Amino acid sequence: MKLVTAVLAPERLDAVTGALAGVDVYRMTVTECRGITDPSGDQAPKVKLEVAVNENFVRLTLEAIQEAGRLDPEESSAYGKIFVTELLDVVRIRTGERGPDAI
């Protein structure tokens, strides 16, 4: 199990969630945040997308986010980042399911 966290330009959120739906990934958390991309401390609006996926969905999830998250180079130089971290356990609160079944 992995946690895929993507920090994106807000205008790419609809495209990314649509691309994820296209690979059967629907459950995610989206948070509005701000990114600091240079030494001056200038802040830019971003969205942080967090998706817990089972191993067989990691590659599809990464490809969907990367492809749909790209901006036209003339629009922006700040594309964002994708982070993948290991999940030790997941518990579904409603049913008590654990591990891959809880995702």
Image: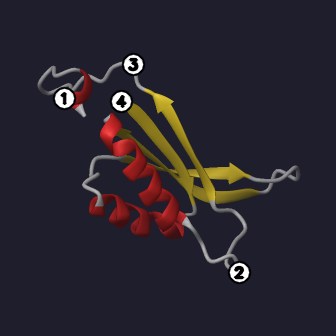
Residue 88 disc label = 3
| Foreground of the two, 70 or 37 | 70
User: Of label 2 and label 3, which has the lower sequence position?
Assistant: 2
Residue 71 disc label = none
Q: Residue at x 42, y 47 (%)?
A: 59
Badge 2 local density, few (<14 within 10 Å), some, or many (20+)? few
Q: How many marks?
A: 4
User: Of label 4 and label 1, which has the lower sequence position?
Assistant: 4
Q: Amino acid at mark 3?
A: Leu
Q: Amino acid at mark 4?
A: Met
Give the quadrant of residue 71: bottom right
SS at badge 3: loop
The residue carrying mark 2 is 74
Contact? badges 1 and 2 (CB < 8 Å)? no
SS at badge 1: helix
User: Of label 1 and label 3, which has the lower sequence position?
Assistant: 3
Contact? badges 3 and 4 (CB < 8 Å)? no
